[in-house]
Image: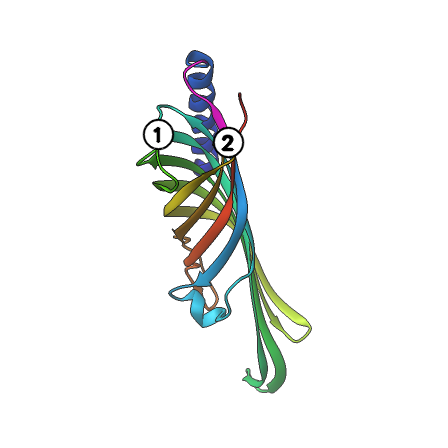
Amino acid sequence: MKAIKILITGLSIILFQHSLFGQQGAWKFNAGYSVAIPAGNLKNLVEETSLRGWSASVMYSVTKEAYVGIASGFQDFYQKYPREILHGEGSDVSAVVSNSIQVIPIMLKGKYNFSQEGRVQPFAAMAAGGNFIQYNKYYGQFVDSRSKFGFAAQPEIGVHIPIGKMRRIGLEVSAAYSIMPFKYNDADGLNHLAVKAGVGIPLQR
């Protein structure tokens, strides 16, 4: 609940800044595809790179270099292991074990553009907030499931590449490290490295 309150407060601040400095800043929408590589303990649950993800954000320019806004996304991790013998109390069971984990972060995000000139413009960003987690561990037809709302943080570095004559729209490529604490069963953290590619579109002329 604290994370939700922080997000609401942050959004209120952004909207207040927009109404106060409406002619000085601009809104920008970013959306793209995300590929995630498991890190830390998550590698023990899912070894395969996740190709099922996306990211999006709505940002407001406080200055020419600095943006603040709200970011979200989705990443789906899945791993199926060969059939194995599971030893229980008084009996052994043969089952195919598979792990299915989905994360949906909703975070406040700050972004700083180091340059607005040139064909390639580097930037750095930091986001923090809440994270909807769905954990499922399947033992054949049986499932051990847990849903949770937790914390998430995501430092990010990347480049913005303007396109078109007006150079208002741009391609963005970045790498971000997602910090996602989560402890349940054999899971102890869902940290991962994400590589993103998308497009940035201004919402105001």
> How would you classify the magenta stretch by its main secondary structure?
loop
Would residue 70 be found to the left or right of residue 145 on screen? left
Q: x and y percent of residue 123 in the render?
A: 35, 40
Give the mark nearest the N terminus, 1 or 2.
1
Q: Residue at x 47, y 14 (%)?
A: 19
Nearer to me, 118 or 133: 118
Is 172 above or below relative to 44?
above
User: The residue tagged with tag 2: helix, strand or loop?
Assistant: loop
Q: Residue at x 48, y 35 (%)?
A: 4
Q: x and y percent of residue 136 in the render?
A: 58, 63
Q: Amino acid at mark 2?
A: Lys
Q: Which residues are magenta?
A: 23-28
Nearer to me, 115 or 113: 115
Q: Is residue 133 visible?
A: no
Give the residue pinned by disc 1: 66
Give the residue pinned by disc 2: 165
In the image, residue 26 lies in the stretch drawn in magenta:
yes
Q: Amino acid at mark 1?
A: Ala
Would residue 15 be found to the left or right of residue 154 on screen? right
Sort mark 2 into few (<14), some (14-19) or many (20+) by Cα contacts within 10 Å. Answer: few
Would residue 83 be found to the left or right of residue 42 on screen? right
